[in-house]
Amino acid sequence: MTKWIEIGALNDIPVLGSRVVRTASGDVAVFRTSEDEVFALDDRCPHKGGPLSQGIVHNKRVTCPLHNFVIELRSGMAVAPDEGCTRAHPTKVENGMVWLGVQTPEVVPAE
């Protein structure tokens, strides 16, 4: 199940930049494109775990600051010839506020 948490105003994230949100399952990098689209990925490059939040945002991609792996912001997939994937998280912007969807464990009733 997805739980939505408000993480702040869109204007708090620099254009072509990011902010890091700490969650129970690890750090999530929240990115803003030049068109004010917002995407979120685990803050770990699939190559060597580099901090994607410190990478260069261009178009709808981020380039890892360690080894220049290019990652699609929408899917978390590496762009060929790079390989790998980091987890993408749902986001939404409502009334200028950014929301991050985080997974919560499903409770299974006992039988």
Image (spheres, rainbow, N blue to C red):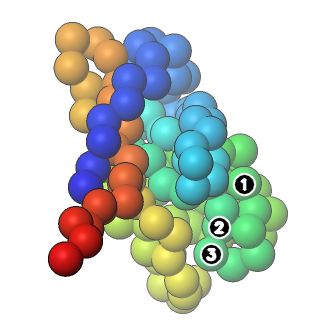
Q: Earlier in the sequence, mark 1 or mark 2?
A: 2
**Residue type at numbered disc 3:** Pro
Inter-mark Cα distance, 1 to 2: 6 Å
Front position in the image: 13 or 90: 90
Tag of residue 51: 1
- Binning the other alpha carbons within 10 Å of mark 2 as few (below 14), some (14 to 19) or many (20 upward) gives many
Instruction: From the viewer's perspective, tell me whether residue 31 is left or right of residue 51.
Output: left
Question: Residue 49 location in percent, x, y?
Answer: 73, 68
Question: Residue 99 location in percent, x, y?
Answer: 33, 30
Front position in the image: 74 or 7: 7
**Residue sitting at x 57%, y 55%:** 25
User: With respect to residue 11, does 37 lie above or below?
Assistant: below
Contact (CB < 8 A) between labels 2 and 3? yes
**Residue type at numbered disc 2:** Cys
Badge 3 marks a residue whose secondary structure is loop
Tag of residue 19: none
**Residue type at numbered disc 1:** Pro
Question: Residue 54 location in percent, x, y?
Answer: 71, 44
Decide if residue 56 is in sight here: no
Front position in the image: 4 or 48: 4
> Can you tell which quarter of the image residue 74 is in?
bottom left
Contact (CB < 8 A) between labels 1 and 2? yes
Instruction: From the viewer's perspective, tell me whether residue 60 is left or right of residue 24.
Output: left
Q: Earlier in the sequence, mark 3 or mark 1?
A: 3
Instruction: Read off the residue under disc 2.
Output: 45
> Can you tell which quarter of the image residue 1 is in?
bottom left
